[in-house]
């Protein structure tokens, strides 16, 4: 006979799981003890928080659900950050957890019990708030079927996290040989299909784009999500995609002569060095990008919800549905026209919608390239070449840019560091930049870099402030343990820089200053290489050396704490957009 735990590992293998990111504890041990006899590798960081971010990042980059495993109370607390990022950032992810039940003692408030009874915690309530769907199966067949459905729901439509709460007794029970209802093949049960827009909606969108004099594409995270799904052959019945959403986005830009801008989560869906690229829109975006959106007569929004940061908090001069034609493409019909009324909705996978547009029409004008060329100037500033010390953060962004190629991925944390990169790191190719921005938690970049290196085999550079780096610096040791070599760049201003810069007077906000931590010694204690960089001329060489190395490097870069990100970027919209559309 086969136990549920054994059959569950077999199911994961059938669904092509290569990594489980997790931490042993509770009844999840019953599952993990069978992993060594499979082809699935366990990646065990130092806590469930880092494991959850690794699982989310794996799903984001591969289009296949990243699997998180751990004990219920800690998956619901420490591990919630990755699940929240996955839900709001549309990353496919599976949480395999348990309720720490104690059999007949479950109604008597046993230690760590979290199935929701009086006297315990309610894991189902937590999961209901941070996942797309969750299951609490009580039998072997329900457990296996729930796992199959969890994989299906994680990638169906708008991707996101799902969860299975394993029952303490069912996980060790034998699986019946001939159950009713039957258990189907895992691959067939988990199979999904991509949606595509209707012919009528495509025709309406084509008509609008062909008639446009100033067409602009706003590309969001949905383009990344669609492109990642191509790596999953089960996504299509024929097993192949002719092109990724990245390819189709470029084809549409060419077909209709569009300027291309991105949301902050959509950065690197289109090469920012391309002649049509104008940069990142929004309150922390480029003035040039915001200008062209304001000037557009037709906006094609692809995989972007147009949240308040993307839309400059809905400044009335920015997007104007009463004056502009809005074509909104999204995998979820609820998102199209969510924030601004749309004239045309294209509901389906981004690659499918873009392919239909590229095939159906064509147009040309002289406006797009000229405006994109002007907008591209906003990636540069005198501070990018500044030789002073402490190092200007703009200079750091440009030194990182110099070592980024199409085989390099940058993971950006939350805080000032992310906005310096959004504004000054000009990505040379698609899929070279990913940031924390679903829920936007600090500490994301480090474990994300470890996962990205495992999932893609590419060079990875994690960028965080000293606050975010400290939260998950154990990821450096995980990288050492698993034989990968990301570069960890710390933009160190010995403070919570973004919050500190919100002060009107020094010391006005409590808790923003840190003592000077020696990250070099910490890196060395983990088995990595640590280096403090205080002079701008030393940074490029340090980055190149770290990128070539087989051992993780931590670069403690001392930045100018007086360089105010908010003041530098505030003019990107509010001070300049007025009158642009007149």
Image (cartoon, rainbow, N blue to C red):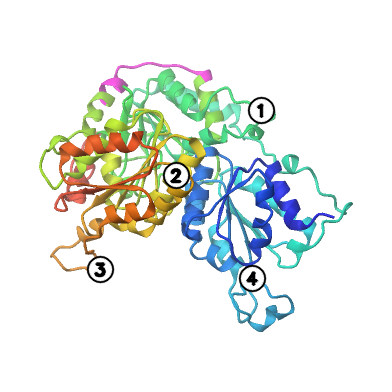
Q: Earlier in the sequence, mark 4 or mark 3?
A: 4
Give neighbour class at mark 4: few <14, some 14-19, many 20+ (Cα, 10 Å).
Answer: many
Say which residue label 3 marks.
511
- Describe the element under mark 1 as helix, strand or loop: loop
Residue 122, given in percent of the width and then of the height, sits at 59, 71
The answer to whether residue 181 is magenta is: no
Q: Please state the extent of the stretch shown in magenta in the rendering.
A: 359-371
Contact? badges 1 and 3 (CB < 8 Å): no
Q: Earlier in the sequence, mark 2 or mark 3?
A: 2
Say which residue label 4 marks.
100
Give me the C-alpha separation between circle 4 and circle 3. 36 Å
For the C terminus, the quadrant is top left
- Disc marking residue 305: 2
Quarter holding residue 382: top left
Contact? badges 2 and 3 (CB < 8 Å): no
Q: Of residues 120 and 488, which is closer to you in this image?
A: 488
Give me the C-alpha separation between circle 1 and circle 2. 29 Å
């Amino acid at each position: 006979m086969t136990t549920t735990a054994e059959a569950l590992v077999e199911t994961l293998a059938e669904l092509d799981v290569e990594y489980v990111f997790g931490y042993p504890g509770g009844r999840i041990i019953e599952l993990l003890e069978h992993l060594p006899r499979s082809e699935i590798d366990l990646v065990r960081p130092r806590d469930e928080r880092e494991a959850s971010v690794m699982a989310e990042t794996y799903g984001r980059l591969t289009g296949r659900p990243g699997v998180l495993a751990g004990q219920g109370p800690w998956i619901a607390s420490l591990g919630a950050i990755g699940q929240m990022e996955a839900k709001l950032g549309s990353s496919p992810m599976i949480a395999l957890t348990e309720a720490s039940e104690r059999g007949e003692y479950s109604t008597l408030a046993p230690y760590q019990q979290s199935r929701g009874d009086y006297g315990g915690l309610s894991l189902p309530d937590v999961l209901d708030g941070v996942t797309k769907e969750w299951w609490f199966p009580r039998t072997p067949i329900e457990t296996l079927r729930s796992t199959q459905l969890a994989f299906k729901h994680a990638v169906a439509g708008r991707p996101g996290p799902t969860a299975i709460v394993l029952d303490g007794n069912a996980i060790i029970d034998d699986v019946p040989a001939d159950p009713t209802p039957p258990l189907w093949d895992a691959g067939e049960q988990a199979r999904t299909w991509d949606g595509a827009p209707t012919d009528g909606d495509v025709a309406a969108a084509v008509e609008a784009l062909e008639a446009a004099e100033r067409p602009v594409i706003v590309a969001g995270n949905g383009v990344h999500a669609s492109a990642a799904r191509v790596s999953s052959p089960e996504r299509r019945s024929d097993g192949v995609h002719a092109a990724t959403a990245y390819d189709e986005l470029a084809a549409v830009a060419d077909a209709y002569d569009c300027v291309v801008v991105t949301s902050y989560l959509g950065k690197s869906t289109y090469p920012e060095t391309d002649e049509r690229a104008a940069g990142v829109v929004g309150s922390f975006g480029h003035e040039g990008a915001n200008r062209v959106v304001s000037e557009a007569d037709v906006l094609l929004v692809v995989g972007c919800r147009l949240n308040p940061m993307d839309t400059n908090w809905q400044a009335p001069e920015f997007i104007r549905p009463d004056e502009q034609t809005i074509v909104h493409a999204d995998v979820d019909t609820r998102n199209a026209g969510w924030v601004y009324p749309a004239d045309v909705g294209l509901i389906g996978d981004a690659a499918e919608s873009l392919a239909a547009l590229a095939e159906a029409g064509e147009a040309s004008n002289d406006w797009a390239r000229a405006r994109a060329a002007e907008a591209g100037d906003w990636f540069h500033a005198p501070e990018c070449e500044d030789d002073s010390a402490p190092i200007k953060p703009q200079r750091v962004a440009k030194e990182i840019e110099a070592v980024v190629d199409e085989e390099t991925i940058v993971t950006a944390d939350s805080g000032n560091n992310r906005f310096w990169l959004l504004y000054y790191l000009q990505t040379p190719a698609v899929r070279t930049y990913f940031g924390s921005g679903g829920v936007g938690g600090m500490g994301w970049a480090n474990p994300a870099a470890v996962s990205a290196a495992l999932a893609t085999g590419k060079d990875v550079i994690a960028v965080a402030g000293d606050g975010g780096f400290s939260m998950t610096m154990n990821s450096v040791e995980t990288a050492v343990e698993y034989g990968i070599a990301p570069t960890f760049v710390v933009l160190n201003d010995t403070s919570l820089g973004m919050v500190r810069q919100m002060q009107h007077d020094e010391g006005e906000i409590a808790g923003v200053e840190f003592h000077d931590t020696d990250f070099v010694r910490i890196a060395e204690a983990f088995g990595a290489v640590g280096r403090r960089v205080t002079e701008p001329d030393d940074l490029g060489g340090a980055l190149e050396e770290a990128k070539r190395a087989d051992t993780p490097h931590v670069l403690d870069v001392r930045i100018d704490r007086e360089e105010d990100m908010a003041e530098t970027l505030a003019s990107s919209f509010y001070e300049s957009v007025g009158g642009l559309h007149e």
